Image: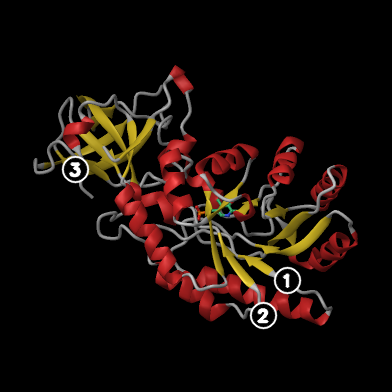
Amino acid sequence: MSFPIERFKEIRTPFYYYDTALLDATLEAIKQELIPNYHMHYAVKACTNPIVLKHIAKAGFGCDCVSGGEIQACLEAGFNAEDIVFAGVGKSDWEIELGLEAGIGFFNVESIPELEVINEMAKERGKIARVSFRINPNVGAHTHANITTGLAENKFGIAMEDMEKVIRIAQEMQNVEFVGLHFHIGSQLLVMDDFAALCERINELQEKLDKVGIAIPNINVGGGLGIDYQNPDGNPIPNFKAYFDTYKKGIQLREGQQLHFELGRAVVGQCGSLITKVLFVKQGSVKQFAIVDAGFTDLIRPALYDAFHFIQNLTSPDAPVEKYDVVGPICESSDVFIKDYDMPKVQRGDLIALRSAGAYGEIMASQYNCRQLPKGYADL
Ligand SMILES: *Cc1c(COP(=O)(O)O)cnc(C)c1O
């Protein structure tokens, strides 16, 4: 990726920079793999920067929302209401109302009490809500415990054993229409075996439901495909072919059945970088610190998940390499982007890029320490 460094010098740091050419190429790579009964709903929670959303809406994708605010952002960005799916274990009344009034495509329902409330609220408004059930498939995803969602111990979804009962309850209700099943097993998955295991579970469940005469018009397999944080320039676009081939091979779809995907990170992760300035280089007794003007308020992934972001010295890419702890200004000892990192020697005023920050970056920023939220730019 090349960066418009001269333009960067005119902008207050830290800020996010989105490479829309890479985003568009990524969207195109996904489109190449979609067959007619496959549908992509971008998982909006990864990044709701309006420029990014508009590019994705323009590509013709739907979206996967987990809050009323996200539904509003998507409608503003130009997504069709029918292409919006709405998930989440705790939907508030106003959010359900917004979904009903906008006429969204699916409510991904995660409990019986939620189903009852949606039925009730749809009835009051003379509407029929299209619901699909999120199933907890008890498939382990071998990533960080905080981003694994498909195990029985997680708060998400309805247990596999209860599924038939819950579908029957929905079929009895007047103001909901049962339209499918929803799964999501975790995030930053790079081994296709986990998705293959999910396909197996879905096939088993379908066979069970076939036997009792329950048809499932739509299956939504969620997201979770990871990106290469170690080597963003080597692998700027994830291996979508391997990912979709796993489903093409693994899931036995029934006649007319539609398959839905909700990728987030894989769509936007590589196109975004956090641009920050070196404030001071400090020699500690055992360490050398590069103190930068971005902190975990701007990019929380390293502090929250121990996540790795490749750091690029934009100003002096060819300087001799030295070892640094790259740290932010926040008054917390967890405000460290990386420890003992080899990078070209930096000095005060140098610009550096924390790469692969397009997903779960800008959107997770906070104002802790009365800091300003970072802005997001593209096409500078
Ligand atoms: C977060 C989330 C996604 C997207 O996950 P990625 O790892 O970013 O692809 C998809 N579906 C649901 C229900 C989610 O909560």
Viewer-side residue, 380 vs 350 = 380
What crowding class fits label 2: few (fewer than 14 Cα within 10 Å), some (14-19), or many (20 or more)? few
Residue drawn 63% across and 41% down? Answer: 67
Say whether residue 24 is visible. Answer: yes
Say whether residue 359 is visible. Answer: no
Does mark 2 have its CB less than 8 Å from ligand 1?
no
For residue 343, which numbered disc appears in the image?
Answer: 3
Label 1 vs 3, first from the N-terminus: 1
> Circle 2 sits on which residue?
254
Q: Which of labels 1 and 3 is toward the front?
A: 1
Report the amino acid beneath label 2: Arg
Q: Residue furthest top?
A: 370
Label 1 and label 3: CA atoms lie apart by 52 Å
- Is 113 on the left or on the right of 42, as rendered? right
Viewer-side residue, 326 vs 313 = 313
| Residue 219, image x, y percentages | 65, 67
Viewer-side residue, 195 vs 105 = 105
What crowding class fits label 3: few (fewer than 14 Cα within 10 Å), some (14-19), or many (20 or more)? some
Q: Are marks 2 and 1 in contact (CB under 8 Å)?
A: yes
Label 2 vs 1, first from the N-terminus: 1
Report the amino acid beneath label 1: Ile
